[in-house]
Amino acid sequence: MYLIPSLIMFGCGVYGFITRKNMIAILISLELMLNSVDINFVVFNRFLYPDQMDGMFFALFAIAIAAAETAVAIAIIINIYRVAKKVDISEITKLKF
Amino acid sequence: MSFDFSILVLALPLFMFLFLGLVGVKMGKKITGVVGTIAMGVTLFICYSIALTYFFGTDQKQVIDGVRQSVLAYDWNWLTFTDKLVVKLGILLDPISAMMLIVISTISFLVHLFSLGYMSDEYGKPEKGFQRYYAFLALFTFSMLGLVVATNIFQMFIFFEMVGVSSYLLIGFYYTSPAAIHASKKAFIVTRLADLFFLVGIMVLSYYTNTFDFKELMASPESALSTAHGQTFMGCSVMAWALTFIFIGGAGKSAMYPLHIWLPDAMEGPTPVSALIHAATMVVAGVFLVARLFPLYVLEQGAMNIVLVVGAFTALYAAAIACVQSDIKRALAFSTISQIAYMMTALAVSSNVGEGIHEGGLGYMASMFHLFTHAMFKALLFLCAGAIIHAVHSNENSHMHGLHKYMPITSIAFLIGCLAIAGIPPFAGFFSKDEILVACYEKSPLWGVWMAIVAGMTAFYMFRIYYLIFHWKKHEVKEGHHAPHDMQWTMTLPLIILAVISCVAGFIPFGDFVTVDGKPLETHTNWPVAISSVCIALVGIGLATKMYYKENKLPSQLKSKFNGLWTAAYNRFYMDELYQFITHKIIFQKICKPIAWFDRHIIDGTMNLLADMTTSASFAIRKLQSGSIQSYVLVYFVGAILLAAITMVIVLI
Amino acid sequence: MDYSQFLIMPQEIGLLVVFLLVFLYDTFMPERCQKALPVCTTALFALYTVFSFLPVQPGTAFAGMFESSDATWAMKAILNLGMLLVLLQSVKWANSEFVAVRRGEFYELLLLTLFGMFLMISARNLLIFYIGLETASLPLAALAAFEKHHYESHEAAAKYMFTAIFSSAILLLGISFVYGMAGSFDYSELATALVDKKSALLIASVAFVIAGVGFKLSLVPFHLWTADVYQGAPTAVTSYLSVISKGSAAFAFLVMMVQIFGAVYADVWKWMLYAVIILTITIGNLFAVRQRNLKRFLAFSSISQAGYIMLGIVAANTLGMTSMMYYILVYIFSNLGAFAVIAVIERQANKVTIDDYNGLFKTNPWLAFTMMIAMFSLAGIPPFAGFFSKFFVFAGALKTGDTAIYILVLIALINTIISLYYYLLVVKAMFIRQDDCVIPTLKSHWTERTGMILCSLGIILIGLVSCIYSMLNSAAEASSNLFALI
Amino acid sequence: MEIFSNILIYFVIVPLLTLAGLALCRNKGIGAIRTVAVIGASALMVLAIALVAIFLQERGAGNEAEMLLTGSWTWYEPLNIKLSLGVDGVSVVMILLSAFIVFAGVFASWKMDPLPKQFFLWFFLLSTGVFGFFISIDLFTMFMFYEVALIPMYLLIGVWGSGNKNYSAMKLTLMLMGGSAFLMLGILGIYFHSSADGNLTMNVLEIAKNNAIPENWQLFLFPMTFVGFGVLGAMFPFHTWSPDGHASAPTAVSMLHAGVLMKLGGYGCFRIAIYLMPFAASELSWIFLTLTGISIVYGAFSACVQTDLKYINAYSSVSHCGMVLFAILMFNQTAMTGAVLQMLSHGLMTALFFALIGMIYGRTHTRDIRDMGGMMHIMPFLGVGYVIAGLASLGLPGLSGFVAEMTIFIGSYENTDVFRRVLTILGTSSIVITAVYILRVVGKLLFGAVQNEHHRQLTDANWFERLSTTTLMLSVAIIGCFPNFFVDIIRDSFVPVVKALNEFFPVAGI
């Protein structure tokens, strides 16, 4: 029951990842997914186990790491743009089969 | 006295084989031949001394209350099958083996001697492979002697194989001529087929009796047969089957119908070889085998009747064919077949019912007697043929005619042979054949008459051959060839010796030596039979004289009259074609080829198919690796969900 | 807080020291000395590797978040060995012109990822595990993108990065479910809390955790990134990816599964893993069969190898655990042997397809020899170590006595035939095929040669010298309480 | 180190030393390479003969133990894997056979080119595996040596082979390894059921003693092991690697493969499959009897139409090896003894065949009998050798083939099971078919007119070829003339297995 909003959000994230062309947009939808999970942690902690703080901490760590991930991802995207002059993910298919 | 020295009869020829085979190549050809002949002479001497000591030995142990005992000179364990079934190699001396020793060594020695001349060209220069020839002769002698002195049925089988191989090697001696190769192959494979049955027979027999040993088998044939406890297979008792199979083995070697087809072709070999192997010794191995197991056969009338029918039919069949052959060696070959069939029949007609094994064993004695005499005069005939062929370089009697005044000695020797085989007293053949006919009449008049007819035909075709070779018309010498003449002494001497034997051998009181149970059997000539048989023989001879003494049209008229019969007989009633059809068209084309195809295409195909399926599968799924991140993640996500969902379905529901 | 608990993590601390020294060297040494950096790092790390073999006393630290046992100690030692080999073969590459400027970062990042993996291995708390996982995978993305002048390198990095983030999201989802059910992140507490909680949520969380870690182990169907990344990334990074991160992830995965979800082994995740293993081995092989590019080829082969490693996990007993660690050890040596050869040839002749290797034996017998025994070892041919490791993982799996697992092992065995086929293709190319444009005789750098010699020795000796296995076994026995719930 | 006090271990050490010695030789130093190889091979032969002497002496001293010279050294303690050595009569004669063929093989590959060093390296690695397999009685070590023996075939054929070698080598390796995959599962299964009371073992003797494998498991594991070894034993329908493999392999490799490697199959079937799982053996034997019976006749028939010399012998090997497995499944001492004799005889004469074929091929550069003829003129020694090999193969008394086949047939008939008897009678027919195809080859190849005039210039065998073939001819003749010597060694080894089998299959006879 607590899960519903976060799961919807997660679903949106996945959908965005799979449909969007621009890599930045994809990155955003990834953020969406991560945050939906963070919501899970917080909600569970708040409503199910109010007497402890583990979930909160975990959420904090997750956010921090997500930030790091985004940073690296952005860096890579920029590099790709430098080298290949494109941000359209459907064109990044040189390596296959 | 002891028979310790008897081992030499095997050791010496074997050694000579190895010696001539390995060292002979280094030695000169002539010397090789001479050495071989001398060694054979020594063997001859040993064999005679063995036989004579056996028959006339003064040792008390040998003859106990009138029964001549058999002597087990050697018996070595060679191969252990089970605790009971042990193959032994040894030397067993009893009347028939002693008699065979004499036959084999005599003929073999004479052939050695004869070959010195025959295997050389006109100028006495030995031809190629002279050493090989003598080595093989020694090998054959060894195998044949080993066969006759076998102490157990398996040793006999072993030497059956050995003689088979050595005859293969000797027939194929001229290994460059396709005919010889084909003939040797045929001879080996046909006899091998027979040996297969022999083997199966041995397997069955030995399984029930739990022994290979002749002495044990002969000790009490009834109990040996009863070990099968009356088990039957397809109606007949198991033992009957076993004995029949063993007989088939013998029939292969002895060229009984329908396994006779190899013998005529075997004449591709050198003629002395034909004389030794395919007239005198090896071809009687089958008869010898049946004689060995005679007590068992006598008790199994089922098997015995088969022997009888096959023998009698073959005798007539072969005689019929022999009447029209133009190749003298083939004609002689068919006459051999017919004569061996005679011996088989003689064995088969004897019985233990009525007067009991001793009296009933007349046929047995007669058969052995005929074996002896036939070996002599048939060898004589073949050696004569050899001399003739060597003189005119051809087997076809159309190239001969009227050789009488060129080769008198040969001619006379041949004539003696013919008289002997035709059964004209006082020549050897008469006595033995007479006994056989008596035995047949005792069995039933039908067989008596039947065999008498065969005897008549024998007389006819033998004299036909004789006249066509030596008279018929004047011999025209082809230019470039010098006139044929009698050969040097090494070739004529054997002829003379054999001719003499053929004249006198009949007077040997054979019954005193060779009988079923070792007791002497006094033979009284049965005059009606004797006279009738002589008359039939004379009729045959007269017919032959009428038709073939002087050149005339009668044969061709008859030929054109009975054209169908004549061609059929001339083509040996198309037995070879039948075999050709079966082997090539059926087995080769319809079995081997398809199997090979099946192997290459079906079985191999399956294996390759597996491989191809793998590669094609890997090619099919490569689209999965499309290279776009989104599809990867899609697969990823769906995979995760599916993993969860399916497990939920399985576990929770 | 007492600092004595740091004493139970000497390997981590040692690693950090190495990292710091490298960092200082990279930052403060003058430019002329920089060229020596790779060699110095390798030497330093070699020293540390030796030191890391010193036994540690077992125990837990930080309120049970971090555990050190014989098993973890052995596992880290194994990884250190692998790391050393990777460093050895990367020295020359790190000094090549395009990379030289950033060679320091390369080593620092590499050491950091290793540190992350150590955390994963020792983690007894999902938080630590997660942090370790990310510490291990984030820098790898950067490393994959290390060859700036190569577009492929970037594409590889992008693919790795995006899939990594996605997978961590999935993993987090699974973890959050677990948290929701048990209200804790501590393995042992979870274990007790999750007993007889067989709910859809639990199953989902198990599936997501498998998916999340399956990304690092590149199990089918979470494997699709593997080939592309392996092909695109620098060979040093690829070899690192293929062995080290796989090994650490496998160990951590084993610990997680048997401890947290031990209660539902028999009726939930055993079957999941059966399915995943069969898929992994088969699909991996099928893809490998028609690969011509050696790096892709090894990627797929490493996928199917991961399947065999999983056999040790699904066994869920000490024998399986031993065999898994042993398998990883052997796999490190075999795979790195192959990659070392590839690295040499790629660096000097710039050829990576199998057909380029035709007739290699004629010109470079030793390279060909190393490659051959590596291939045989991967294919599991005695007397090379691969045979033993395969035999032992099968033994471990069959020890469970489950009848279904006989079928699983049979399928795995049949797959070994396919794998043998494509490994033999490489051997065939090197020894049997002839070619006119054959690779010239190459002169490999001494570090690379050392690496290859070490690999060859390992491949030949590890199997024959049985004490290694016995040692691992005793280590696994020491932590047999892991399997309390199975 | 008391492991070195056991003579058996040297059968592994000597080849390994030879490998080391070869590794030290220079690539070009053909002389040194040959010397090392010859020394190694001769040492093995001496060892083998010494082993036979020791064995006879032990037995003579009344040592009735099932295995002699046993010794056991723990290797992998956690799984209770040991390096257990031990020999009974069967393994002794097998070792003797292998030693002879390795010796002959070295001389047969005297002029090996290219890369002689590598060739001999692989050659001796292969022999290491073979000997190791025969001396060890621990499932794991047996299996390991088995695979060690298999894999060198790939490169030996692939590099030094001829014809369609890539395909053949790959096919052979994959099929044999496929067999060993089943084998591995079977062995592990046996291991995990090896003992009722938890302490599992890999030692064949102990497993047989415990006799704890549940019957339903036997029914599952027996086919695994039997097929696993049967593939190597060229059992129909898993024989198709054999023709191609032999056809493309270089001479010495064909010799070793047909002469020794295929024997591993029969030996393993007996030692592992039947010995350890008598129940399943007696239950399922009818399936494999049918298969082996088929391969006897089938191989012989398909040999009749081949035109490539090596194919003919490959198919005849299928037939003869089928006879080995066939006899093993007859479950009585006589037949099993016959099987071992057949292994010996087939090993030697097939090796002889392949050696001669290799030498003829090396001269004429064709193996098609239609293109050859009258070789007896041109190369009498090889011709005579070929005839002898042929006669041995079609079972001439005095040569090995006859002894083996007769023992098999008599023994098989001892088994009163009707189905078996029928198969036996059918099996005997193979002696005729064998005669047919052997004589066909001899007639076409050696006799007749010379087909190709260029062949007239060809030379006869030179000394090392003579040495190699004479060794084999002599051993064939020795077995054929003094079979009881070998029978006495072999026969008693089957007492335990036959006893075990008789519980489930009483009609088999002893």
Image (cartoon, helix red, strand yellow):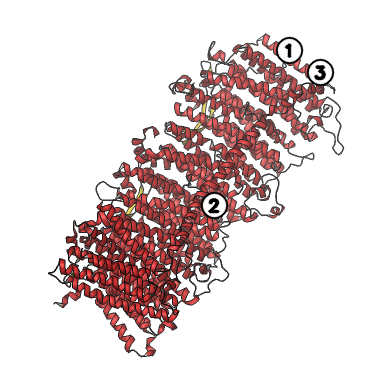
Identify the residue shown where x is 35% and y is 54%: C409
- List x then y, in percent, for residue C115: 28, 75
Q: Say whether residue C118 is visible.
A: no
Q: Quadrant of the C terminus of chain C?
A: bottom left
Residue type for callout 3: Lys
**Horizontally, is B90 left or right of D330 in the view?**
right
Residue B236 vertical position relative to residue D152 in the rendered view, above or below: above
Give the CA distance from mark 3 to mark 1. Answer: 16 Å
Label count reads 3
Give the CA distance from mark 1 to mark 2. Answer: 70 Å
Q: Say whether residue B182 is visible.
A: yes
Check the image and name the residue furthest to the top.
B528
Q: Which residue is mark 3?
A: B546
What is the chain letter for disc 3? Answer: B
Q: Quadrant of residue C79?
A: bottom left
- List x then y, in percent, for residue C65: 19, 70
Of callouts 3 and 1, the N-terminal one:
1
What is the chain letter for disc 1? Answer: B
Looking at the rendered structure, the secondary structure element under dot 2 is: helix
10 Å crowding of disc 3: few (<14), some (14-19), many (20+): some
Q: Which residue is mark 1?
A: B535
Residue type for callout 2: Asp
- List x then y, in percent, for residue C433: 54, 64
Q: Quadrant of the N terminus of chain C?
A: bottom left
Residue C159 vertical position relative to residue B214 in the rendered view, above or below: below
User: Can marks 3 and 2 be said to lie on one chain?
Assistant: no
Residue D244 shows which numbered tag? Answer: 2
Give the CA distance from mark 3 to mark 2. Answer: 68 Å
10 Å crowding of disc 1: few (<14), some (14-19), many (20+): some
Looking at the rendered structure, the secondary structure element under dot 3 is: helix
Nearer the observer, D195 or B106:
D195
